[in-house]
Image (cartoon, helix red, strand yellow):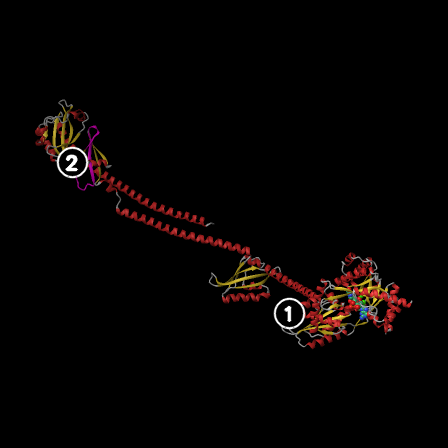
Amino acid sequence: MTGKSIRFLGVGSRWAIVIPVVAIVCAAVAAVIYADWQQSRITHENNRHMVQERLDLVRTKLQGQINANIRLLQGLVSVIGAEPDLTQERFSALAANLLLHEAQLRSIQAAPNLVTAFAYPANLTDDQIGTRIFTEDEELALTRKLREQSRSVVRGPLPLSSGGYGLSIILPVRSVNATAEPVFWGAVTGVIDLARLYDQSGLMTFELPISVVISKVQDAGRTAVIYGDGNIMQQNPVHMAIDFGNDRWTIAAIPVGGWENSGTPSMAFRLVVGSVAATVAGASIWVGLLMLDRQKHDAALRQREEKLKALSHRLGLALEASKIGVWELDVESGENAWDARMYEMYGLDGSQAMTSDNWLALIHPEDQADVSAKVKLAIRTQMSQSAQFRVLLPGGGHRHLRSFGTYYPNAKGTASVLGVSWDVTEDVSLHEELVEARQRAEQQNTALDTARRRMEYNALHDALTGLPNRRYLDQHLSDIEADPDGQGLAVLHVDLDRFKEINDTLGHGAGDAMLRHVARALRDNVRGEDFVARIGGDEFVVVCLGADADDQFGEMGQRLIAAVNTPTSYAGHECRVGASVGIATRTDASVDAPQLLVNADIALYEAKRLGRNRFERYTELLKARTLNIKKTADAILRSLAADEFIGYYQPQFDAHTLEISGVEALARWNHPEMGILTPDRFLDIADSLSVVSQIDARILEQALSQLSRWQSAALGIDHVSVNISAQRLFDENLVGRLEQLDIKPGSVSFELLESISFDDKTDAVTASLSRLRNLGIEIEIDDFGTGYASILSLLKLSPSRLKIDRELIGPIVDTPAQRRLIASIVDIGRSFGIGIVAEGVETMEHVSILRDLGCQTLQGYALARPMTADALMDFALAHRARRESLLKLSA
Ligand code: C2E
Ligand code: CA
Ligand code: CA
């Protein structure tokens, strides 16, 4: 219900009180007025009655008086009727007799035939003798009355000669004539003194409580007042009539002072009635006010009740919706009052009376102690407590409840714990699920973490040896760099010697076993804190922190080499491998860790250069050389642009005729400061700069132009061999470029170093070589016998010639075995139709041996050194001339 309608009701009910109160007050006032009016009316009636009674008395007396006078006069009438011949003396005697009576009669006249003849007392009536008693106007009517009807006539009031007023009473007189027949005699008139009549009728009494007026109707209906105040006639007087035969009087009266004064209720009455009414009205107003007040309170109370109802309704709804149960535990009695929801939550139907004991019994045994402790604590501390516990359901299973109770002194005056409980089973199971989910997530995380760590580990480690890999090394070095602690740092770069041979000869399984052996050997021979990584196929790096002594690492290098050298067996084979070690140590902070690795690499290179299976330290000398290399590299690039690489030419001779059969073009660097430099001074550096193929191209160009020059000079040189680097050979654009050149088929050979590894690119190289052959370019295998390539794989390249390395040629003079080697190479060449060239032919002895062994072509200092193009022209001409002269001599 809205506040407005409540207020409206209040207003309505206020009227319900005000209206009756007003009605009561009005009724009281009306009652007072009515009582007053009624009282007035009763008083008035009483007065009127009193007036009537008094008036009646007055009238009766008046009439009585008059009648008494008439009777007196009737006596006289009787006498005169009997004595019609009356004399004055007799009349006076009779009249005097009458006047003796205490009557009001003042005078008496007798008028035979209605003319006054006798009068008494004489002094008063003398003037009337001889006058008719009636005026002419009256004569007819009154005479008839008297004569024919024998009725008396009363006339008056008439002024009296002696003063005052009087009333005439005229009586008819009858007598009998001589024949005893009744005849009308005349009339007797008595005059009554009105004042005396009034007095004796009680009118003049001072105590008379009424004011009387006597009037009579005159001619033409006019009334004339005979006595009293004529105004009374206008004041609703009490009327009565007095009949005198011919005359009719009206006597009327009102109370002395008028009706108003006499009719008003008494003051006492009014006071009583007024006070009663005032009491009633006052009481009802007071009651009304009290009721209004009460109503106001009632309204407030009702409003509060409504509010309370709404509130408790809302609370009920909230409790219903939230499924919260309410309980109250009486501390003294142990009674536990539950609402319906509590029973519901405990799975009970509500019929059981609850006490603290049987309540506890419903709680899971494991939770009982805690709950009972909480209740006790709440009672002891008189504070709120909350608890979560399980309740055992009658149908089995349990439910989680949370309770909140607070100490409170209840309405009974004893203490109780009032509380609420609600079902948190879902929350608990949700929580449990969450916990489980979190555990699962954590497990997953752990698994993911493990996987991630494994991946990270894999990313940073070499799968074969389990050692850190190149990436890890870089990271390690940059870590060191990020946190330089001023400690000494050493990097040992270990490279296996001829590891490829093991792979090639014993297979990859042996290679892998060897690598694992090496890894173990390295690990076992460094300090615990040292870092060992495998950074390439057969390359390892050891990083040592916190070491100052340089010697220490020399020893370590030696130890590592010895450990690697230890033979290990694989599939019944005893395998051995050598190791070269480059060592770089940091002596000052100017060198960073990555640079140290470069330095170690330089030292390693040096160790290899100096014969392998040894260690070499990075020294100032090496540093200088490195710097020199750098300088040289710059110079090479400059000279390439300046076209300062030029071809030298070394003639090749027919072993039998010693005629010039061809020329090998050899690169020279025409250094601006140092003059002509041989390939050993620049080729490695040019290789590292990847510019060898450019040099090759220059030399080829120059060789071709020289070739045409030689041919036009008819020197008999129509074949040139040029060296081709692996880099150039693998250049995809090589063939395209060569096609641009004017190469006469069979005039150009490409010398390929036997050491070039074709293994992984065999197909590509084979294709490339066949295209070269299509261009008419022949293939020769250079430095044959120094590499490890199998002869079969070399034969696949379909070379036109094999050039036996000068290392193999040199010893043939002294070593028969070496000679046999050459002989077998020659055999192979012969059986496959491949020409054999011997280089490094340094003595004439070599010439004859090689010729005898079956080599077709010879090249070497014994016959000619490499020379400029111009020198070659001169040489060729001179050689031909000499040969011709020799031939002439022999001929
Ligand atoms: P190579 O192809 O084996 O060239 C023969 C080398 O042996 C030349 O050295 C030559 O001067 C030298 N020689 C010739 N006869 C004798 C002798 O009787 N005794 C001794 N001890 N040496 C002799 P050079 O010109 O210094 O060339 C060295 C190497 O440089 C060449 O060896 C070749 O592999 C390479 N080379 C030279 N020119 C070029 C080039 O234009 N391109 C490429 N890729 N490599 C080149
Ligand atoms: Ca060569
Ligand atoms: Ca060679």
In this rendering, position of residue 93 left or right of residue 467: left
User: Can you say whether 268 is above or below 98 in the image?
Assistant: below
Query: From the viewer's perspective, is residue 376 above or below residue 138?
Result: below
Disc 1 marks which amino acid? Answer: Glu
In this rendering, the answer to whether 758 lies above or below 184 is: below
Q: Which residue is mark 1?
A: 481
Q: For marks 1 and 2, give the CA distance.
A: 170 Å
Q: Quadrant of residue 708?
A: bottom right
Residue 593, quarter of the rendered image = bottom right
Image location of residue 516, percent across then percent down: 75, 70
**Is residue 554 shown to the viewer in this render?**
yes
Part of the protein shown in magenta: 196-224
Residue nearest the viewer, comparing 578 with 442: 578
Q: Position of residue 266 (x, y in %)?
A: 26, 45
Q: Callout 2, which amino acid?
A: Leu
Above-or-below relation of 848 to 11? below
The quarter of the picture where residue 656 lies is bottom right
What residue is disc 2 on? 197
- How many residues crowd mark 1 within 10 Å: few (<14), some (14–19), many (20+)? few
Between 519 and 12, the one nearer to me in the picture: 519
In terms of secondary structure, where does tag 2 sit? helix
* The furthest residue to the top: 179
- Quadrant of ligand 3 in image: bottom right
**Which residue is at a point 36% across and 46% down the rendered structure image?**
22
Residue 597 among those drawn in magenta: no
